[in-house]
Image (cartoon, rainbow, N blue to C red):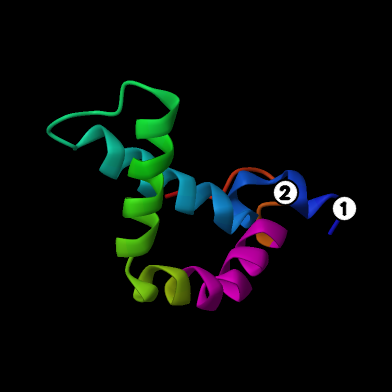
Amino acid sequence: MDWPAQSLDLNPIEHVWDFLGRYLAARTLPPVTIRELRLALQDEWATMPQQLIDTLILSMGRRCETCLAVRGDHIPY
C-alpha cells in the first residue's frame, strides 16, 4: 500500500486520541489549565481498558484488507 500511514483508518493512535477526547469531554469538571489537561490525560490513559488496545491491534489486518478493497479511500462504517 502506498502511504498507509496517511490513512486515519490505519492509524490506531487516532482511535486512542478519540477515546481520550471523549472521556475528557465527559468529565464533570473539564481541565482548564495545561497542567490540569496533562493530569486529566494521564488519568484517562491509566484507566483506558487494555481490551481497547488489544482490539485495535487485532483489527489491523481487517483494516488493511478493507483499505485495499476500497483502494485507499476511507473505510465505510
> Tag 1's secondary structure?
loop
Region in magenta = 56-68
Tell me the residue that label 2 is attached to: 72
User: What type is the residue that disc 2 sits on?
Assistant: Gly
Image point 72% across, 60% down: which residue?
68
The secondary structure that most of the magenta stretch takes on is helix
* Closer to the camera in the image, 43 or 71: 43
Residue 6 vertical position relative to residue 44 in the rendered view, above or below: above
Per the image, the residue denoted by label 1 is 2
- Determine whether, in the image, residue 45 is placed left or right of residue 61: left
In the rendered image, residue 40, in percent from the top left (x then y), is placed at: 33, 42
From this viewpoint, is residue 76 visible?
no
Q: Residue at x 67, y 60 (%)?
A: 69
Q: Disc 1 versus disc 2: distance between alpha carbons?
A: 8 Å
**Which residue: 29% across, 38% down?**
24
**Residue furthest out toward the top:** 32
